[in-house]
Amino acid sequence: MIKRKSKDETKRMRHAGHIVALVHQKMKEVIEPGISTKELDNIAHKIIKENRAIPTFLGYHGFPGSICASINEEVVHGIPDENRILKEGDIISIDVGATYGGLVGDSAWTYPVGKISDDVQKLLKVTEEALFAGIGQMHEGNILDDVSSAIEEVANREKYGIVRQYGGHGVGHSMHEDPFLFNYSVGDRTVLKTGYAIAIEPMLNLGCDEVTVADDEWTVSTADKKPSAHFEHTVMVTDDEPLILTKLME
Ligand code: MG
Ligand code: MG
Protein backbone atom coordinates (compact mmCIF):
# COMPACT_ATOMS: atom_id res chain seq x y z
CA MET A 1 0.00 0.00 0.00
CA ILE A 2 1.22 3.50 -0.77
CA LYS A 3 1.21 5.89 2.16
CA ARG A 4 0.81 9.65 1.93
CA LYS A 5 3.57 11.52 3.70
CA SER A 6 2.60 13.79 6.57
CA LYS A 7 3.75 17.40 6.75
CA ASP A 8 6.49 16.43 9.18
CA GLU A 9 7.67 13.50 7.05
CA THR A 10 7.71 15.79 4.01
CA LYS A 11 9.86 18.28 5.89
CA ARG A 12 12.40 15.62 6.78
CA MET A 13 12.40 14.25 3.23
CA ARG A 14 12.99 17.76 1.92
CA HIS A 15 15.96 18.03 4.26
CA ALA A 16 17.31 14.63 3.11
CA GLY A 17 16.81 15.76 -0.47
CA HIS A 18 18.73 18.95 0.17
CA ILE A 19 21.71 16.96 1.43
CA VAL A 20 21.56 14.74 -1.65
CA ALA A 21 21.52 17.90 -3.78
CA LEU A 22 24.58 19.21 -1.91
CA VAL A 23 26.41 16.02 -2.88
CA HIS A 24 25.45 16.45 -6.53
CA GLN A 25 26.50 20.09 -6.47
CA LYS A 26 29.94 18.96 -5.29
CA MET A 27 30.12 16.05 -7.75
CA LYS A 28 29.56 18.43 -10.64
CA GLU A 29 32.46 20.50 -9.36
CA VAL A 30 35.02 17.73 -8.78
CA ILE A 31 34.30 15.31 -11.63
CA GLU A 32 37.22 15.61 -14.04
CA PRO A 33 39.76 13.38 -15.74
CA GLY A 34 42.09 11.75 -13.18
CA ILE A 35 39.73 11.40 -10.23
CA SER A 36 38.78 7.91 -9.04
CA THR A 37 35.26 6.78 -8.22
CA LYS A 38 36.45 5.96 -4.70
CA GLU A 39 37.53 9.58 -4.20
CA LEU A 40 34.06 10.68 -5.32
CA ASP A 41 32.55 8.26 -2.81
CA ASN A 42 34.70 9.65 0.00
CA ILE A 43 33.63 13.22 -0.81
CA ALA A 44 29.95 12.24 -0.91
CA HIS A 45 30.21 10.30 2.35
CA LYS A 46 31.80 13.27 4.10
CA ILE A 47 29.08 15.71 2.97
CA ILE A 48 26.31 13.36 4.11
CA LYS A 49 27.91 12.83 7.54
CA GLU A 50 28.68 16.53 8.01
CA ASN A 51 24.99 17.22 7.53
CA ARG A 52 24.00 14.73 10.22
CA ALA A 53 22.51 12.29 7.77
CA ILE A 54 23.13 8.62 7.01
CA PRO A 55 24.41 7.42 3.62
CA THR A 56 21.42 5.31 2.64
CA PHE A 57 23.28 3.11 0.16
CA LEU A 58 26.15 2.13 2.46
CA GLY A 59 25.47 -1.42 3.61
CA TYR A 60 22.16 -1.61 1.72
CA HIS A 61 22.01 -5.34 0.86
CA GLY A 62 25.74 -5.18 1.57
CA PHE A 63 26.58 -2.41 -0.93
CA PRO A 64 30.07 -1.11 -0.05
CA GLY A 65 29.72 2.59 -1.04
CA SER A 66 27.79 5.76 -0.23
CA ILE A 67 27.26 6.39 -3.93
CA CYS A 68 26.80 4.23 -6.99
CA ALA A 69 29.30 5.31 -9.63
CA SER A 70 28.58 3.88 -13.07
CA ILE A 71 30.84 4.74 -16.01
CA ASN A 72 29.87 4.78 -19.72
CA GLU A 73 28.09 1.48 -20.55
CA GLU A 74 27.45 0.87 -16.87
CA VAL A 75 23.82 1.66 -16.13
CA VAL A 76 23.51 1.56 -12.35
CA HIS A 77 25.03 0.12 -9.14
CA GLY A 78 28.71 0.64 -10.02
CA ILE A 79 30.91 0.13 -6.94
CA PRO A 80 33.29 2.99 -6.03
CA ASP A 81 36.85 1.84 -6.67
CA GLU A 82 40.23 3.56 -6.27
CA ASN A 83 41.34 1.89 -9.51
CA ARG A 84 38.50 3.28 -11.58
CA ILE A 85 39.91 6.57 -12.83
CA LEU A 86 37.79 8.91 -14.93
CA LYS A 87 39.15 9.98 -18.29
CA GLU A 88 38.29 12.63 -20.84
CA GLY A 89 35.22 11.68 -22.85
CA ASP A 90 33.69 9.37 -20.22
CA ILE A 91 30.27 9.84 -18.70
CA ILE A 92 29.61 8.94 -15.09
CA SER A 93 26.28 8.36 -13.38
CA ILE A 94 26.30 9.20 -9.70
CA ASP A 95 23.39 7.86 -7.67
CA VAL A 96 23.18 8.93 -4.04
CA GLY A 97 20.79 8.56 -1.13
CA ALA A 98 20.70 10.27 2.25
CA THR A 99 18.55 9.42 5.24
CA TYR A 100 17.70 12.33 7.54
CA GLY A 101 15.43 11.94 10.54
CA GLY A 102 14.52 8.49 9.26
CA LEU A 103 13.41 9.70 5.82
CA VAL A 104 15.18 9.15 2.50
CA GLY A 105 16.09 11.32 -0.48
CA ASP A 106 17.32 9.56 -3.64
CA SER A 107 18.71 11.21 -6.76
CA ALA A 108 20.99 10.32 -9.67
CA TRP A 109 22.64 12.39 -12.34
CA THR A 110 24.91 11.58 -15.29
CA TYR A 111 27.89 13.89 -15.72
CA PRO A 112 30.23 14.38 -18.65
CA VAL A 113 33.96 14.05 -17.95
CA GLY A 114 35.59 16.81 -19.96
CA LYS A 115 34.41 16.94 -23.54
CA ILE A 116 32.12 14.15 -24.72
CA SER A 117 30.83 13.18 -28.14
CA ASP A 118 27.71 14.82 -29.56
CA ASP A 119 25.63 11.64 -29.57
CA VAL A 120 26.40 10.96 -25.91
CA GLN A 121 25.72 14.60 -25.01
CA LYS A 122 22.33 14.18 -26.63
CA LEU A 123 21.68 10.99 -24.67
CA LEU A 124 22.25 12.93 -21.44
CA LYS A 125 20.04 15.81 -22.51
CA VAL A 126 17.19 13.54 -23.60
CA THR A 127 17.33 11.34 -20.49
CA GLU A 128 17.09 14.46 -18.34
CA GLU A 129 14.18 15.57 -20.52
CA ALA A 130 12.51 12.18 -19.96
CA LEU A 131 12.89 12.65 -16.19
CA PHE A 132 11.19 16.03 -16.33
CA ALA A 133 8.46 14.70 -18.63
CA GLY A 134 7.74 12.11 -15.92
CA ILE A 135 7.84 14.73 -13.16
CA GLY A 136 5.36 16.81 -15.15
CA GLN A 137 2.77 14.04 -14.74
CA MET A 138 3.04 13.93 -10.94
CA HIS A 139 -0.35 15.52 -10.36
CA GLU A 140 -3.14 14.42 -8.05
CA GLY A 141 -5.67 12.40 -10.01
CA ASN A 142 -3.24 11.28 -12.71
CA ILE A 143 -2.32 7.60 -12.80
CA LEU A 144 1.11 6.04 -12.46
CA ASP A 145 0.98 5.02 -16.10
CA ASP A 146 0.89 8.70 -17.11
CA VAL A 147 4.38 9.06 -15.61
CA SER A 148 5.68 5.88 -17.29
CA SER A 149 4.17 6.83 -20.65
CA ALA A 150 5.64 10.33 -20.59
CA ILE A 151 9.12 8.89 -20.03
CA GLU A 152 8.65 6.23 -22.70
CA GLU A 153 7.44 8.76 -25.26
CA VAL A 154 10.63 10.83 -24.95
CA ALA A 155 12.84 7.72 -25.17
CA ASN A 156 10.97 6.32 -28.17
CA ARG A 157 11.23 9.61 -30.02
CA GLU A 158 15.00 9.15 -30.09
CA LYS A 159 14.84 5.34 -30.44
CA TYR A 160 16.86 4.89 -27.25
CA GLY A 161 16.84 1.63 -25.35
CA ILE A 162 14.79 1.74 -22.15
CA VAL A 163 16.17 -0.37 -19.30
CA ARG A 164 13.35 -2.75 -18.35
CA GLN A 165 14.59 -4.50 -15.20
CA TYR A 166 15.05 -1.38 -13.10
CA GLY A 167 12.86 1.63 -12.54
CA GLY A 168 11.49 4.20 -10.15
CA HIS A 169 9.91 3.52 -6.79
CA GLY A 170 8.05 4.91 -3.86
CA VAL A 171 10.40 6.33 -1.25
CA GLY A 172 10.09 7.43 2.38
CA HIS A 173 11.06 5.59 5.54
CA SER A 174 12.97 3.19 3.34
CA MET A 175 14.58 3.72 -0.03
CA HIS A 176 12.35 1.31 -1.92
CA GLU A 177 8.67 1.45 -1.13
CA ASP A 178 5.57 0.78 -3.22
CA PRO A 179 4.84 1.43 -6.00
CA PHE A 180 7.38 0.27 -8.59
CA LEU A 181 7.48 2.73 -11.47
CA PHE A 182 8.26 1.32 -14.90
CA ASN A 183 9.97 3.60 -17.40
CA TYR A 184 7.56 2.39 -20.08
CA SER A 185 3.82 1.96 -20.13
CA VAL A 186 2.46 -1.16 -18.44
CA GLY A 187 -1.02 0.26 -17.84
CA ASP A 188 -0.67 0.76 -14.07
CA ARG A 189 -3.83 2.64 -13.07
CA THR A 190 -2.72 3.48 -9.52
CA VAL A 191 -4.11 6.98 -8.86
CA LEU A 192 -1.60 9.60 -7.66
CA LYS A 193 -2.55 11.39 -4.47
CA THR A 194 -1.15 14.38 -2.61
CA GLY A 195 1.61 13.22 -0.28
CA TYR A 196 2.85 10.37 -2.47
CA ALA A 197 6.62 10.48 -2.90
CA ILE A 198 8.16 8.66 -5.84
CA ALA A 199 11.73 8.45 -7.11
CA ILE A 200 11.46 8.86 -10.86
CA GLU A 201 14.53 7.55 -12.63
CA PRO A 202 14.70 6.89 -16.36
CA MET A 203 17.72 4.85 -17.49
CA LEU A 204 18.15 5.24 -21.23
CA ASN A 205 20.66 3.58 -23.53
CA LEU A 206 22.19 4.72 -26.79
CA GLY A 207 21.74 1.17 -28.05
CA CYS A 208 19.61 -1.80 -27.08
CA ASP A 209 17.55 -2.09 -23.90
CA GLU A 210 19.18 -5.29 -22.63
CA VAL A 211 21.47 -5.23 -19.61
CA THR A 212 23.76 -7.69 -17.84
CA VAL A 213 24.99 -7.89 -14.24
CA ALA A 214 28.74 -8.22 -13.62
CA ASP A 215 30.48 -10.91 -11.54
CA ASP A 216 30.62 -8.43 -8.62
CA GLU A 217 26.83 -9.02 -8.52
CA TRP A 218 26.19 -5.26 -8.52
CA THR A 219 27.35 -3.46 -11.65
CA VAL A 220 24.65 -3.39 -14.33
CA SER A 221 25.86 -2.71 -17.88
CA THR A 222 24.27 -2.51 -21.30
CA ALA A 223 24.52 -5.80 -23.19
CA ASP A 224 25.87 -4.07 -26.30
CA LYS A 225 28.36 -1.95 -24.28
CA LYS A 226 26.91 1.30 -25.59
CA PRO A 227 26.59 4.25 -23.15
CA SER A 228 23.72 4.59 -20.71
CA ALA A 229 22.40 7.63 -18.83
CA HIS A 230 20.48 7.84 -15.55
CA PHE A 231 18.66 10.86 -14.13
CA GLU A 232 16.61 10.69 -10.96
CA HIS A 233 14.73 12.96 -8.59
CA THR A 234 12.58 12.17 -5.57
CA VAL A 235 9.29 13.94 -6.27
CA MET A 236 6.12 14.51 -4.26
CA VAL A 237 2.55 14.98 -5.45
CA THR A 238 1.06 18.12 -3.90
CA ASP A 239 -2.13 20.18 -4.22
CA ASP A 240 -0.12 22.42 -6.50
CA GLU A 241 2.87 21.74 -8.77
CA PRO A 242 4.96 18.56 -8.31
CA LEU A 243 7.52 19.14 -5.55
CA ILE A 244 11.08 18.04 -6.32
CA LEU A 245 12.48 17.02 -2.93
CA THR A 246 16.06 16.36 -4.07
CA LYS A 247 17.07 19.89 -4.89
CA LEU A 248 18.80 22.59 -2.89
CA MET A 249 16.63 24.48 -0.39
CA GLU A 250 16.53 28.21 -0.95
MG1 MG B 1 18.90 6.44 -6.83
MG1 MG C 1 16.03 5.27 -6.85
Image: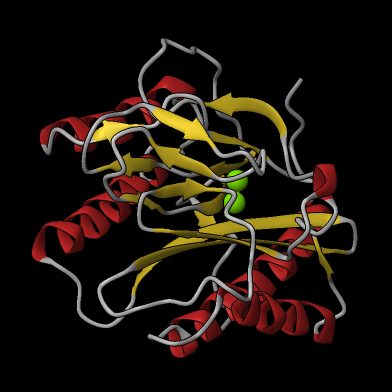
**Where does residue 142 sit, x and y in percent of width and height?**
44, 26
For residue 143, side relative to residue 100 (left or right) = left
* Residue sitting nearer the eye, 138 or 59: 59
Q: Residue at x 54, y 20 (%)?
A: 191
Q: Residue at x 63, y 55 (%)?
A: 106
**Where does residue 82 sit, x and y in percent of width and height?**
63, 76
State the quadrant of the C terminus. bottom right
State the quadrant of the N terminus. top right
* Residue sitting nearer the eye, 178 or 158: 158
In the picture, residue 64 is in which quadrant?
A: bottom right
In the picture, residue 111 is in which quadrant?
A: bottom left
Q: Residue at x 47, y 44 (%)?
A: 201
Above or below residue 118? Residue 241 is: above
Q: Is residue 143 visible?
A: no
For residue 224, side relative to residue 244 (left or right) = left
**Where does residue 165 sit, x and y in percent of width and height?**
50, 25
For residue 195, side relative to residue 147 (left or right) = right
For residue 188, side relative to residue 11 (left or right) = left
